[in-house]
Amino acid sequence: MKRIKFPIREKIKACGIACCTLLAVSCNSFLDIVPDNIPVIDHAFTNAMEAEKFLFTCYSYLPGSGEPSGNIGMTAGDEIWLNMPNHVASPAWDYIAKGVRSADRTQPNFWSGSDYTYPLFMAIRDCNIFLENVEDTSKVADLTVDKRARWIAEVKFLKAFYHYYLLRTYGPIPIVDKNLPVSASPEEVQVKRRPFDECVRYIVDLLDECNPDLPSVIANKQSELGRITKPINRALKAKVLLLAASPQFNGNSDYANFRNHDGELLFTPDPDPDKWALAADAAKEAIESAESAGHELFYFKDAPFEISETTKTQLSIRQAICERWNKEVVWGRSGGRGRAGAALQNACMPLLDGGMNINTVRGCIAPTLAIVEEFYTKNGVPIDEDKTLNFTKINELRTATADERYNFEQGYQTARINFDRENRFYADIGFDGGKWIMEYHPSRSDVDTYVLKAKRNQLGAGVVNGATSSTGYFTKKLVHWESGFGNTTTGVVEYAWPEIRLAEVYLMYAEALNEAEGPVADVHFYLNEVRKRAGLGTVEESWKNYSKNPTKPNTKEGMREIIRRERLIELALEGHRYWDLLRWKLATDYFNKPITGWDINQSQAVAYYQVKTIYNRSFVAPRDYLSPIDTKELNVNANLVQNPGW
């Protein structure tokens, strides 16, 4: 059996049981064989305590979203670039972003597993084993009726999620509803990929089936936060249907002739506008489910010292991610590599002063110039649309004034593009000359706080080889403002990675509803709710007063562009942009541009602020829109077809 390396994965006793169930066959051979070691499986379901261990095994396959090694979207696209020598494990950057994948080098590989990557068909197999045993009321005799129903619902959700994750990555997949017995014939185990719409229906039906038995809120917050609830379930349903409605999978002509070996068409050739209405309905239901359970957009309120309204707004944005179990987090990932701990925050944090531990802070998760340009101006419109501000020369030097003291060190020279930007830019992005507030700074002030200085020979440039930004920008958004990085501070404050935030659900609804009905009132309302938290005016006000294209919000096409931009900004650096550009079928436009940043090896501002090409990315369409299936899988199962172009 192939060995899968999980160097950071937390081990639990039940994982040993789960692995034993796979010894009968190679995990590269069949997707849904139930192993012939029944005594071991029976022991796993002798009582509730043992069955609960197997339940947690089913959870343990969830991809590690709180680390760059597991959050594929974080480094596979064009918004974050790493450095060499690399201080962060990230197969998505090594293979996808650099364009070196092949059918023989398929990392990250969620089909059968690879370094830092969980085998999700194995996860589905374990989910099926759990369901077959716990749904049998003659087993686990001490399990109460309510708990049995809840556990079954949780595992059905996980099974749906794993199918969705594979579907988003590979396109049409085999549906593994039941495990086959060891006695199954060779023909039975040679499973084939099912049409995309059939996969979507299967996932959605499974989510609908299990939703009634899930709790609306977690009652036992000491030990159960992170487990599945109704709002999580409804939000995932909306994500699945939004994916199905999007151009990548809804009438994509590139897949018009993509078939199984028997000629079965795997995609419907014509776009179906009704899919947007289904996605909108699901997203509205997800909003109602979340809000009725107490979820709301996060606003920062309780600073331990006096801060300005500007800083309060920026901490509302930043801590919506980092504040542990805040009400905006619909699904927080607290277990194993799901949580955002020292590995992630150290990799984001630059060296801000001499008291920080130079052996831990790395600052190497670097936003690119492309994502820096994405953020709005302070007026809430794109930099190339603002009729009152000129961003033609983005590297032109400008000196910060006293009026800009919350975002810059007064008197410091930095690039024009860093000025006059919206609060999400200053909350998310660190840059040379910019303020970086942390709770433990001795001044207890948001004016006299840390200043990031990142040119050559300055602290932010790093003292360990490669342990700094490759672009001149740093990821502030993912660093908890109470985390400590020095010998006299308390250490990194871990938080549950926000797999789904309410802001995302609002934006899903706005996108789907606009496509279904145009820019109706609800589209504006939910979009403006997200903008309001960022300190921006409404879309109508901002475009009317500041944009060169004041009527843009009045049309479906104009609002589509605005919603997409809003989503790229609000969810920036969290791992969404890569997947969004794929499903919008825009990856060819974005991922064939060079990765750029400043010339970080320069010590003088004039030389430092020169745009430099760091890497020439390439994206081959339609090939790169779907991940390749490993050649070994195709050799074992003759019924599997490879994705187009691979």
Image (cartoon, helix red, strand yellow):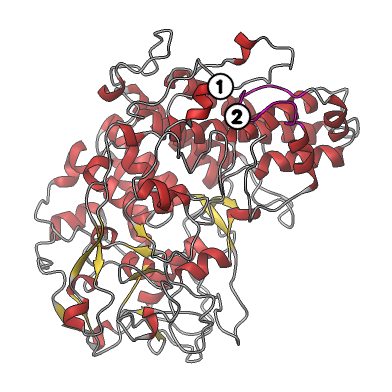
153 is higher (above) or lower (below) than 563: above
Q: Which mark is residue 636?
A: 1
- Residue 511: give x, y in percent of width and height: 33, 39
Q: Where does label 2 land, which residue?
A: 28
Compared across the picture, whether 81 is left or right of 147 comes to left
Q: Which residues are magenta?
A: 21-35
Disc 1 packing (10 Å; few <14; some 14–19; many ≥20): few
- Tell me the CA gap for discs 1 and 2: 8 Å
Q: Quadrant of residue 327?
A: bottom right
The reply to whether dot 1 and dot 2 touch (C-beta < 8 Å) is: yes
Locate the C terminus by quadrant: top left
x, y percent for residue 350 = 43, 76
Quadrant occupied by the N terminus: top right
Taking depth in this image into account, of 134 and 176 the one nearest to the observer is 176
> Can you tell which mark lies on residue 515?
none
> Judging from the image, what secondary structure is the residue with disc 2 in?
loop
Residue 535 coordinates in the image, percent (x, y): 32, 65
